Image: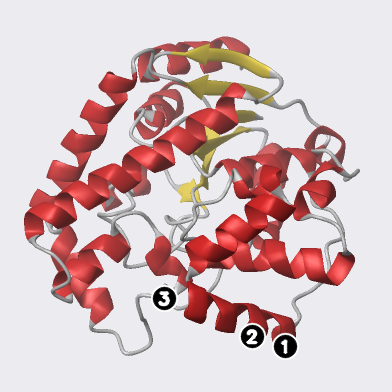
Amino acid sequence: MVALMGPTAAGKTEAALGIADAAAVDLVSVDSAMVYRRMDIGTAKPPAAVLERHPHALVDIRDPVDTYSVAGFVADADDAVRASLAADRTPVLVGGTMLYFRAFKAGLNRLPGADESLRGRISTRAKERGWPALHRELSRRDPEAAARMDPNNGQRIQRALEVLELTGRPISYWWSTSATEVSRRLGCRLVEVAIVPPDRRILHGRIADRLDDMLARGLVDEVGALRNDPALSIDTPAMRAVGYRQVWRYLDGDYTHDAMVERVRAATRQVAKRQLTWLRGWESLAQSVPGPREARAVVLQNL
């Protein structure tokens, strides 16, 4: 099986579709936002016609009101890989949610379940002080985990603090303990390829161009429709996807259209920076390549 990784807007989908046109593969999405229905434009989800030609497992499997955990992803990805292998095809996992890739590769450890009382207390502290303040607290207590988290990602910060309180050990400790690694778990070799543009300016240009395209295709209307759903709020986990929170706040009148565009661009660049940080420390990469054409060639050579 193949893992095709890279920062946002690097061209992963383009590479994956080229691979699917040339070989008997099954594509499996590794994207924490593409799992949600009705979130199409802002997640850069392939168009419906493309998905019909080359289906992606784990796309459109949840409603935005639902939560989707790392454990849920690993279980779903394992099932998709097993089904592909049983059909004598090659699974190609493609996306940029590096935490999902890490969990899929290393397996999950026996972390404690949710403690609603403790979560409530952490949420109360977040309302009083803000998630960035709790992120700073986490940085003191578990710097490795904090370095991999957005200071505004309350769901992940809350879980890390919860694990600290429940076990007395940081969540980064549990990440490093033994689990069933994917090659043993699924009985096949994992080939890992990453698209890493050689110049950060190239990536920033692709990010800006993609956002312009999203806005032209109706990103604001897409977020507006979600905002009109009484089951959703700006604090719903799905709305933490890059772009959605910023457009929502624009529709709330918190800032101008130009300010919203710049905030989305800046947030996307920050996501890309964190993804590149993950990849710089990634072990066992078969190859790091500059673009989608090279990624397609490397993957096809390995099949």
Q: Is residue 50 visible?
A: no
Q: Is residue 63 left or right of residue 253?
A: right
66 or 93, which lies in front? 66
Whole-percent x, y for residue 63 in the image: 44, 73
Check contact, mark 2 vs mark 3: CB within 8 A: no
Residue at image mark 3: 235
Mark 1: which amino acid? Ser
How many other residues sit within 10 Å of disc 2, few (<14), some (14-19) or many (≥20)?
Answer: few
Residue at image mark 1: 117
Mark 2: which amino acid? Gly
Disc 2 is placed on an element classified as helix
- Which residue shows up at 44% across the image and 47% down it? 55
Against 201, residue 259 (above or below) is below
Against 195, residue 78 (above or below) is below
Whole-percent x, y for residue 93 in the image: 56, 37
Measure how far apart labels 2 and 3 are at the Cα level. 15 Å
Residue at image mark 2: 120
Measure how far apart labels 1 and 3 are at the Cα level. 19 Å
Whole-percent x, y for residue 74 in the image: 69, 53
Check contact, mark 1 vs mark 3: CB within 8 A: no
